[in-house]
Image (tube, rainbow, N blue to C red):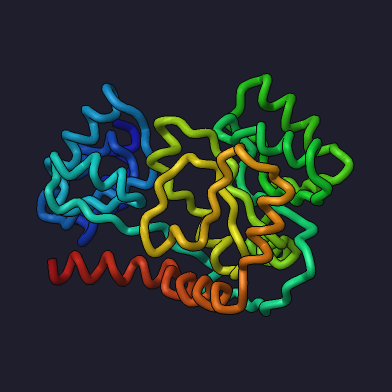
């Protein structure tokens, strides 16, 4: 209620567009019925309580946009025109060159360290490989046990930890990594998560290895190698890197260029304007 009062003081008249991220924001749509409204859902927030709010919200808004096919399927029964619009990247024009080494030396994960990450993969890297590992991101949304694990892990001999970083530092770190990681646990939440960092990785034009937590849609699936914990990880990484060629690099760069946030917003604008 306080938030509503604050927003209403800012907007003396109804805005042209009400862009909603919060599933509990149905009162805003009711307040500005004459405005175009959309719900942009970029994560799975749970069933029961949140689903009730989302059903109510999607019955009121004009458009629903989701960032993964599974999220789109979640809303289609309640809003038949729900659209899948993937995340974008701020690095669509990242300047890189295809400069391949004989073998990969450095793996990397850029993102928050949280309980959603599969620490089994980190342990494999530490104990069963000779790779260096770059990690950049804060430790948040973790259990006490996971916080302790991450705080210990980032002090490991072959781990270089940068903490939370800005856009400029992220761009530099992207250039130092040979193979990127998406090391998530497979659970109900992750199955809906077409994670934002994928597109930053893609913009670098380098290989990406993921745990089997997500069903990758086309055309993105060809740029992700899935590690199922059933083979030697050192060999798996080296083969993934060996198979990555100039053609795949160029395809990744082109796809990333079409995935800028400007492009995503233009797509949303065109749907709103033309249906």
As drawn, 208 above or below 23: below
Q: Residue extending furthest top?
A: 144
Please provide percent x and percent y for residue 112. 61, 42
Looking at the image, which residue is at 77% across and 31% down? 151
Q: Residue extending furthest front?
A: 231
Residue 12 visible, this orientation: no
Looking at the image, which residue is at 44% across and 62% down? 88
Q: Nearer the viewer, residue 45 or 157?
A: 157
- Can you tell which quarter of the image residue 16 is in? bottom left
Residue 237 visible, this orientation: yes
- Can you tell which quarter of the image residue 125 is in? top right
Please state the total of marks drawn on the protein image. Answer: 0
In the rendered structure, the answer to whether residue 125 lies left or right of residue 58 reads right
Looking at the image, which residue is at 72% across and 53% down? 107
Quadrant location of the C terminus?
bottom left
Please provide percent x and percent y for residue 54. 23, 35
């Amino acid at each position: 209620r306080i938030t509503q009062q604050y927003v209403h003081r800012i907007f003396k008249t109804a805005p042209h567009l009400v862009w909603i991220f919060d599933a509990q924001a149905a009162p805003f749509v009711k307040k500005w019925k004459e405005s175009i409204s959309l719900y942009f859902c970029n994560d799975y927030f749970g069933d029961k309580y949140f689903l009730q709010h989302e059903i109510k919200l999607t019955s009121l808004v004009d458009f629903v946009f989701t960032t993964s096919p599974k999220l789109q399927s979640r809303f289609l029964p309640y809003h038949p025109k729900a659209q899948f619009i993937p995340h974008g990247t701020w690095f669509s024009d990242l300047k890189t060159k295809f400069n391949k080494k004989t073998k990969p030396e450095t793996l990397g994960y850029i993102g928050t360290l949280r309980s959603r990450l599969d620490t089994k993969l980190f342990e494999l890297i530490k104990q069963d490989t000779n790779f260096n590992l770059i990690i950049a991101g804060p430790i948040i949304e973790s259990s006490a046990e996971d916080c302790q694990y991450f705080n210990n892990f980032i002090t490991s001999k072959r781990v270089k930890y940068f903490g939370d970083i800005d856009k400029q530092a992220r761009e530099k770190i992207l250039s130092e990594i040979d193979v990127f990681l998406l090391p998530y646990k497979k659970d109900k939440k992750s199955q809906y998560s077409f994670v934002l960092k994928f597109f930053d990785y893609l913009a670098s034009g380098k290989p990406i290895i993921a745990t089997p937590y997500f069903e990758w849609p086309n055309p993105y699936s060809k740029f992700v190698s899935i590690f199922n914990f059933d083979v030697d990880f050192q060999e798996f990484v080296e083969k993934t890197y060996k198979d990555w060629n100039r053609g795949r690099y160029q395809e990744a760069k082109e796809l990333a260029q079409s995935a800028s946030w400007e492009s995503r917003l233009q797509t949303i604008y065109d749907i709103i304007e033309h249906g």
